[in-house]
Image (cartoon, rainbow, N blue to C red):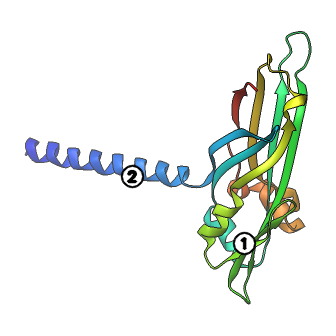
Amino acid sequence: MMGSIMHCWKKCKLWLLLLVFSGSAMAASEGILIKSAELRMVDDVYYLHAQMLVTPNPTLEEALRKGVSLYFMTEFWLKRPRWYWLNEDVAHYTRVSRLSYNALLRQYVVSGVNIHARSTDKLDDALTALGEVNAVPIVTRNELNPHETYQARLSMRLDTTQLPKPLQINAIASGKWDLEATPMVWTFKP
């Protein structure tokens, strides 16, 4: 009898562990993950290249399918640290992107300033296009001191202030509309 109880307990622990890990894996699969970011110099200009993985939760996907456009804000800062005062802003870049769904054409559309509008049949392809930052000019080589070390910071988030007013209230009241990347910070030496 004691052996069967122990055997049952081991099975219950295994199921409990699987339940806990599957729940944390599902929670980790929603959000924005910055996979890579770097500054590359071409013709004396540093360009920003980045790739972010955007994974909306079911609430956002449903709102998108019902015609609600989602606006995402991508921000990049380049700062020079100073020990005697606040850090100096060397460069700042902001991009607002819109992800929408056209029910008539059954296509997802990614558009915005400094983005070539793209439409696709699959949400995954639209999310990939949304997370790409390709060859955005940030700063020229002459504006940087080669003997200094700079701090670069990249972030991306869902801009809930662009949602329709009733959904803004819902976004404040619940966490279902929170979609933000942990900022990526790295040092940069020209």
> Is residue 17 positioned above or below 107 on the image?
above
Q: Where is residue 107 in the image (x, y as percent from the top left)?
A: 69, 81
Name which quarter of the figure residue 127 lies in: bottom right
User: How far from the left and from the top, in percent, is residue 161?
Assistant: 87, 57
Name above or below for residue 118 compared with residue 55: below
- Residue ID at (67%, 68%): 126
What residue did someone put label 1 on? 63
Amino acid type, mark 2: Leu
Q: Of residues 36 and 59, which is closer to you in this image?
A: 36
Tag 2 secondary structure: helix
Q: What is the CA distance from the residue labelled 2 to the residue labelled 1? A: 28 Å
In the displayed structure image, the side of residue 86 where residue 67 appears, left or right: left
Mark with earlier residue (2, 1): 2
Instruction: Say how many tags the image has.
Output: 2
* Circle 2/circle 1 CB separation < 8 Å: no
Q: Which residue is drawn at 68% across and 56% down?
A: 131
Name the foreground residue: 93 vs 146.
146
Is 72 or 12 nearer to us in this picture?
A: 72
Kindly identify which residue carries mark 2.
19
Q: Residues within 10 Å of mark 2 (few under 14, many from 20)?
A: few
Q: Residue furthest top?
A: 84
Considering the image in quadrants, where does the C terminus appear?
A: top right
Which of the 4 image quarters holds residue 188? Answer: top right
Circle nearer the viewer, 2 or 1: 1
